[in-house]
């Protein structure tokens, strides 16, 4: 299902205008953007992220940006009987096997609860009138009026009532990091299922496909980003320490390159929305005392961003598209509301922050009237504090995800290079890091062929593939395993033919044979390693098989239903029943 949804774009209607074709059916070449509508490579985004990292981290720790208000008690309106917290062990069995033996402070309900939520009566129970008072205590500016004024036509992609509720509590985001909580199982699955089910646009027109594809990518990118955080800040229940868990990351995210690329897609759209409001930021008031400091950080961040990150103009162009946009808006609003059904408080809080952040990005991208400067300024001035807080915190979440992915890449390489044991058998062949590696190898090989053996050692030996500056020389037909990956441009170097009497491509020929030989040796080694590993693992695997079968027999004997099914144990099986 996930694959189908991911490939939606590939099946675009052939009659669509060329630009939209590009959006949905990217040409496979080194110029291929990693996501539709983006004109940046993964390496470029990594680079941008390194530059803004310090400022974004420091920004979300300022008093203005670290507080958030949400209502943990808001009723779930999507299904009945949503009462109760995820105390059931079935919510956690997929991650930790025996929770009962763990100390109380490791239980999911404790890990998933909020620390330091300022839930005392005096501070948190606001009436709609003093809704923003807690931030007004920090800052003199009063956005309350603007916030409460509703447009005739509601342009919001989230429900503004979320922030007006009297039961809303004030939370310090910096004290409640998004991390592993043990929340999972059926309840979390049901939430994700309903979120993906919102992606049900009625028509199959190409324009609808664009919206559908973008919607899917945003949700999947959010899902993958959460998966990255919980793997990066994961509890090792044997040592009691928090830290990155490579195996978990690979099982949830890394084995699925499209999930990783969806995180980059989300980064591109949120970054583009920030870039878009750059000219109007100077008129935003944050707080008299530290207004300048906060503004300076924001300006440092947006000055590293670029308009080519994402081209929002490809979506929702004409009147027909306007109705799709309305549909898109109300469906996304539902996603923000589904967060009320999440049982784990901390997950719900970060879910609200991020869905509101995306909602704000979408409003900026799709609701500014390009032709009217004054109205653009007005929309930006009318952004509520919660929208700004969510927007910047969501950007920080994505920035953190990308940094974690870069760190996981190092851990992956260490593992593959045998410094920390053998590679886990469930690491898929076409996992994200493998594809990046292959793309780099293919770039190095191509450069070697282009530059000839003499140049190669000088130019490439000290350079990593991703750093090779390059200009496109000519369209090259090549089978890319990962079509969504855009590699850096190649330098405009002429092909150097070998200086032989016959002027043939003997060097290139030789390289091909040498490479083929090296590949064969490598594959043979891998095969032997695999066989050896199978023998080493055999006693353990046999033990497991015996245990599982014994378990089944025992369950039958004591009259418990046989609940273990091999199918369910496959972590890569996509179980959501998404209706397109
Ligand atoms: C709003 C929300 C916030 C959460 N926050 C946290 C948190 O902060 N900390 C925490 O520990 N847990 C959190 N969770 C739980 C977490 O997301 C998982 O649901 C849980 O860890 C169980 O994971 P799983 O592997 O069983 O599958 P799930 O992640 O529940 O996924 C269900 C199905 O979706 C498919 N899928 C998974 N990822 C993607 C993707 N990126 N794109 C497309 N399809 C995908 C999988 O094939 C899987 O079968 C949150 C859940 C929700 C709904």
Image (spheres, grey):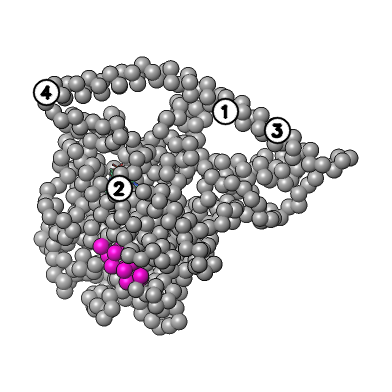
Return the residue at label 2.
Answer: 576
Q: Are marks 2 and 3 in contact (CB under 8 Å)?
A: no
Please rate how many residues cluster around mark 1, counting C-alpha atoms within 10 Å: few if below 14, some from 14 to 19, many from 20. few
**Distance between the Cα atoms at labels 1 and 3?**
15 Å
Residue drawn at point x = 80 percent, y = 45 percent: 497
> Which sits earlier in the primary sequence, circle 1 or circle 2?
1
Left or right? Give the position of 280 relative to 350: right
Q: Which residues are magenta?
A: 324-334
Q: Is residue 528 magenta?
A: no
- Residue 499, x across and y down, in percent: 85, 42
Report whether the residue tagged 2 is closer than 8 Å to ligand 1. Answer: yes
Q: Which mark is residue 558?
A: 4
Q: Are marks 4 and 3 in contact (CB under 8 Å)?
A: no
**Distance between the Cα atoms at labels 4 and 2?**
32 Å
> Which sits earlier in the primary sequence, circle 1 or circle 3?
3
Front tag of 2 and 3: 2
Q: Main secondary structure of the magenta part?
A: helix
Point out the image quarter for the C terminus. Answer: bottom left
Front tag of 1 and 4: 4
Return the residue at label 3.
Answer: 513
Left or right? Give the position of 227 relative to 254: left
Front residue of this view, candidates 331 and 261: 331
Front residue of this view, candidates 81 and 345: 81
> Which sits earlier in the primary sequence, circle 1 or circle 4?
1
Secondary structure under the numbered disc 2 in the rendered image: loop
Return the residue at label 1.
Answer: 523
């Amino acid at each position: 299902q996930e694959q189908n949804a991911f490939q939606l774009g590939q099946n675009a209607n052939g009659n669509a205008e060329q630009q939209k074709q590009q959006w949905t059916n990217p040409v496979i070449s080194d110029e291929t953007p990693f996501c539709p509508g983006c004109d940046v490579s993964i390496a470029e985004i990594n680079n941008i992220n390194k530059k803004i990292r310090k400022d974004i981290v420091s920004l979300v720790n300022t008093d203005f940006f670290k507080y958030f208000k949400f209502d943990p008690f808001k009723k779930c309106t999507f299904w009945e009987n949503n009462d109760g917290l995820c105390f059931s062990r079935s919510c956690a069995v997929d991650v930790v096997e025996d929770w009962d033996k763990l100390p109380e402070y490791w239980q999911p309900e404790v890990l998933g609860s909020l620390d330091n939520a300022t839930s005392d009566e005096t501070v948190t129970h606001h009436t709609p009138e003093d809704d923003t008072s807690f931030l007004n205590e920090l800052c003199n500016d009063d956005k309350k009026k603007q916030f409460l004024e509703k447009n005739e036509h509601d342009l919001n992609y989230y429900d503004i009532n979320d922030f007006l509720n009297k039961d809303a509590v004030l939370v310090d985001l910096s004290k409640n990091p998004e991390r592993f909580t043990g929340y999972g199982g059926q309840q979390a699955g049901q939430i994700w299922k309903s979120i993906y089910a919102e992606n049900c646009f009625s028509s199959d027109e190409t324009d609808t496909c664009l919206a559908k594809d973008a919607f899917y990518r945003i949700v999947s990118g959010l899902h993958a980003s959460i998966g990255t955080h919980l793997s990066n800040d994961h509890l090792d229940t044997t040592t009691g320490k928090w830290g990155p868990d490579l195996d978990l990351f690979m099982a949830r995210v890394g084995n699925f390159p499209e999930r990783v690329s969806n995180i980059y897609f989300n980064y591109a759209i949120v970054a583009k929305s920030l870039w878009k409001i750059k000219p109007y930021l100077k008129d935003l008031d944050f707080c008299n005392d530290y207004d300048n400091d906060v503004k300076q950080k924001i300006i440092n961040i947006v000055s590293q961003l670029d308009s080519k990150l994402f081209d929002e103009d490809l979506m929702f162009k004409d009147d027909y598209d306007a109705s799709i946009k309305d549909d898109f808006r109300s469906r996304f609003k539902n996603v923000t509301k589904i967060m009320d059904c999440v049982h784990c408080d901390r997950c719900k809080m970060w879910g609200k922050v991020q869905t509101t952040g995306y909602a704000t990005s979408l409003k900026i991208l799709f609701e500014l009237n390009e032709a009217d400067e004054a109205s653009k300024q007005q929309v930006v001035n009318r952004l509520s504090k919660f929208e700004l807080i969510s927007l910047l915190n969501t950007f920080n979440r994505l920035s953190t995800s990308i940094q974690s992915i870069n760190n996981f890449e190092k851990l992956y390489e260490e593992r593959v290079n045998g410094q920390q044991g053998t590679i886990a058998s469930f690491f898929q062949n076409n996992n994200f890091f493998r594809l990046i590696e292959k793309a780099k190898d293919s770039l190095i090989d191509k450069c070697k062929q282009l530059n000839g053996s003499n140049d190669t050692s000088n130019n490439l030996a000290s350079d990593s593939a991703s750093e090779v500056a390059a200009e496109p020389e000519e369209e090259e037909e090549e089978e890319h395993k990962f079509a969504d990956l855009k590699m850096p441009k190649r330098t405009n170097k002429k092909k150097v033919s070998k200086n032989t009497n016959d002027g043939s491509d003997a060097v290139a020929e030789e390289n091909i044979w040498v490479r083929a030989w090296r590949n064969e040796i490598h594959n043979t080694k891998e095969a032997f390693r695999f066989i050896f590993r199978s023998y080493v693992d055999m006693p353990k695997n046999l033990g497991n098989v015996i245990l599982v079968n014994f378990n089944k027999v025992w369950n039958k004997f004591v009259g418990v239903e046989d609940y273990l099914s091999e199918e369910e144990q496959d972590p890569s099986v996509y179980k959501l029943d998404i209706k397109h």
